[in-house]
Image (cartoon, rainbow, N blue to C red):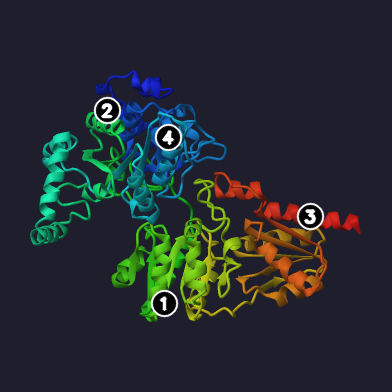
């Protein structure tokens, strides 16, 4: 690591000669691969932008200048170049570096990210603030072609082109690689496109074509058929230029000399500029290049073979959901599956293969996914929208206004609900109970295990109303799966055991640790009952009232923030019934939960069996003393 060892900041990078940067890029890739093989992480995307990160920090004067990485899971090279090499081995670990840019972590991270498509809007806001204060720093927003599918990105582009502020957007296009046999021609075109004469020629050609509508129409049809995909006819940048951006590109994103030239050109121009960069996901690691999807968010793996480390037995909740949906869809042709750029992550890949005409990936567009599904439901279909809990936050208005207000039978399958783990604050699914349970017409369920998940999916598709189903990340409990689907009575909880001293009312994957805690409590002389609530809405009021009259105390457990969560729903039932029974709620306090393994986080929050036991023991002892 002859070069990387000498880099403590971008200032050290600038001391190197341009010809040395390709060797530094190789060292950075080696470091990223080595650390990800142990910690897991977002490997393919980070490997694809190593040269881009080098060029950006070589050209821009960071941290005075601002570089904003959209989503941020591709920013590992950025972290290595900005004084975090010594801690890079802690990335995504409890107490270690975040897997995403984070303002509190480094002055080189000007904006917290984790959800996609925010970079352009944030960068434009910074540009306006800079100009209002008379500052002179430069701003570059790096956004992927996938993130450009989100409406927020286009909203930011639209205003940026209108305001004409000095701002650079780097479009990292990694869907297509630049093949070697046309590389020289591509590089030549990229060079002349950046020239002033070429810009003049391009605009004159564009105006000429507009005067020949029939010819232009036919040429645009030909361009569409040959796969130009909205990237223009005479140049790839026509779309962006129509939005008010100067366009530079396409640039080979692995050619550092060309990147630095293009970025200097863009940095020094006036107004909004878009630099179109072509990169290859997984660059430099054969297994990631061949299967970038598998290495997008990878668990620990063996570097030599590319094989993921053994993760233990059991099927994931995601896998059970995907398999059950395929089974049900075979019997019901009205079932449609919809996802927002996450077919593998949500378990819908098998559905897509089995029923390609009934599967829709709408891109990073959660709002559209839900309203699109409303249209399907309004015409008799049964859409199932699979979205991570944390991303459902982006489509809350559609839940309220489009789905529930119209009482349409859209089933929202919210994966990764609760504690998610190493991706940290931006990805924990800890708010959905609070923001969903207050919406009228919604049925909201959470299974205690993977078998109950199957039955809840079956039940939800039988109901002619909006349904939300939350379930956790990771492996199930390994319970047997019933061959036949069973319909769960609407709003009916499951009483697992009864206890005269304490009743634990748990929801979702907190039920199993609650049962373990109750067993220990009963052994110590505290007769403890457990209720699997199953339904957040409609909540089983009768079961709660009965528990309050047969047990001396009630303890609620949930993997959700306490404010407005499941425990609050239980308190509302007791208040309405006029019952004054001591209640303690266990859940997530008023904080954002940082990274760690799921087990570490649950222990930290007191949401594992031991934590529930300790909280219950203290609760019972406290009340006994008070009495």
Secondary structure, mark 4, is helix
Secondary structure, mark 2, is helix
Label 4 belongs to which residue? Answer: 131
Q: Is residue 518 visible?
A: yes
Q: CA distance from mark 4 to mark 3?
A: 59 Å
Which comes before the other along the chain, label 4 or label 1?
Answer: 4
Residue 442 place in picture, x, y as percent: 55, 73
Secondary structure, mark 1, is helix
CB contact under 8 Å: marks 2 and 1: no
Residue 613: quadrant of the picture? bottom right
In the depicted view, which residue is nearer to us: 600 or 406?
Answer: 406
In the image, which is nearer the foreground, mark 2 or mark 1?
A: 1
Q: CA distance from mark 4 to mark 1?
A: 48 Å
Q: CA distance from mark 2 to mark 1?
A: 53 Å
Mark 4 Cα-neighbour bin, 10 Å: few <14, some 14–19, many ≥20: few
Q: Is residue 327 visible?
A: no
The quadrant of the image that shows the N terminus is top left
Label 2 belongs to which residue? Answer: 22
Label 3 belongs to which residue? Answer: 617
User: Going by the image, does 150 lie left or right of 286?
Assistant: right
User: Going by the image, does 500 lie left or right of 449?
Assistant: right
In the image, which is nearer the foreground, mark 4 or mark 2?
A: 4
Mark 3 Cα-neighbour bin, 10 Å: few <14, some 14–19, many ≥20: some
Label 1 belongs to which residue? Answer: 377
User: Going by the image, does 614 lie left or right of 469?
Assistant: right
In the depicted view, which residue is nearer to us: 535 or 127?
Answer: 127
Residue at the spot 38% in from the left edge and 34% down from the top edge: 77
Which numbered tag is attached to residue 12? Answer: none
Residue at the spot 14% in from the left edge and 50% down from the top edge: 207
């Amino acid at each position: 690591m002859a070069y990387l060892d000498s880099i403590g900041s971008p200032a050290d990078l600038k001391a190197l000669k341009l010809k040395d940067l390709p060797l530094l890029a190789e060292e950075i890739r080696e470091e990223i691969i080595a650390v990800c093989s142990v910690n897991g992480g977002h490997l393919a995307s980070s490997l694809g932008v190593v040269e881009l990160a080098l060029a950006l920090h070589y050209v821009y004067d960071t941290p005075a200048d601002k570089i904003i990485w959209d989503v941020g899971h591709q920013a590992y090279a950025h972290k290595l170049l900005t004084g975090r090499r010594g801690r890079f081995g802690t990335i995504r670990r409890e107490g270690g570096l975040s897997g995403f840019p984070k303002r509190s972590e480094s002055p080189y991270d000007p904006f917290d990210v984790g959800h996609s498509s925010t970079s352009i809007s944030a960068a434009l806001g910074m540009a306006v603030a800079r100009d209002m204060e008379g500052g002179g720093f430069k701003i570059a927003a790096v956004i992927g072609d996938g993130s450009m599918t989100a409406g927020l990105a286009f909203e930011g582009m639209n205003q940026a082109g209108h305001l004409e502020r000095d701002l650079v957007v780097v479009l990292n296009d990694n869907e297509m690689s630049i093949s070697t046999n046309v590389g020289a021609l591509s590089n030549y075109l990229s060079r002349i496109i950046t020239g002033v004469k070429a810009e003049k020629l391009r605009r004159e050609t564009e105006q000429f074509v507009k005067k020949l509508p029939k010819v232009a129409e036919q040429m645009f049809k030909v361009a569409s058929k040959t796969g130009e995909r909205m990237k223009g006819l005479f140049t790839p940048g026509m779309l962006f230029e129509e939005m008010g951006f100067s366009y530079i590109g396409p640039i080979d994103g692995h050619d550092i000399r060309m990147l630095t030239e293009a970025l200097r050109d863009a940095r020094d121009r006036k107004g909004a500029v878009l630099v179109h960069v072509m990169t290859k996901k997984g660059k430099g690691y054969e297994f990631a290049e061949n299967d970038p999807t598998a290495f997008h968010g990878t668990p620990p793996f063996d570097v030599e073979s590319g094989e993921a480390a053994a993760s233990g037995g059991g099927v994931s909740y995601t896998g059970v959901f995907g398999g059950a949906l395929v089974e049900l869809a075979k019997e019901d042709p009205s079932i449609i599956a919809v996802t927002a750029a996450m077919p593998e992550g949500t378990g819908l890949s098998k559905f897509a293969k089995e029923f390609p005409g009934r599967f829709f990936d709408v891109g990073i567009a959660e709002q559209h996914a839900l309203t699109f599904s409303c249209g399907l439901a309004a015409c008799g279909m049964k859409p199932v929208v699979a979205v991570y809990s944390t991303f459902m936050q982006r489509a809350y208005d559609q839940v309220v206004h489009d789905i529930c207000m119209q009482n349409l039978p859209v089933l929202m399958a919210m994966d990764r609900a609760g504690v998610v783990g190493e991706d940290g604050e931006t990805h924990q699914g800890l708010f959905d109970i609070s923001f969903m349970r207050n919406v009228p017409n919604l049925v909201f369920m959470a299974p205690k295990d993977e078998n109950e998940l199957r039955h809840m999916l079956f039940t939800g598709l039988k109901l002619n109303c909006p349904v939300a189903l939350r379930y956790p990340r990771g492996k199930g409990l390994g319970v047997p799966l019933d061959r036949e689907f069973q319909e769960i009575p609407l709003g009916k909880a499951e009483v697992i055991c009864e206890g005269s001293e304490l009743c634990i009312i748990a929801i979702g994957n907190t039920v199993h640790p609650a049962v373990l805690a109750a067993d220990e409590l009963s052994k110590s002389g505290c007769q403890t009952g457990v209720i699997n609530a199953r339904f957040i809405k409609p909540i089983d009021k009768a079961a709660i009232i009965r528990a309050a009259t047969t047990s001396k105390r009630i303890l609620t457990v949930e993997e959700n923030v306490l404010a407005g969560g499941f425990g609050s729903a239980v308190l509302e039932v007791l208040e309405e019934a006029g019952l004054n029974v001591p209640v303690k709620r266990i859940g997530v306090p008023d904080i954002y939960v940082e990274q760690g393994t799921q087990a570490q986080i649950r222990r930290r929050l007191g949401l594992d069996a031991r934590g529930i036991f300790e909280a219950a023991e203290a609760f019972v002892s406290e009340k006994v003393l008070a009495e």
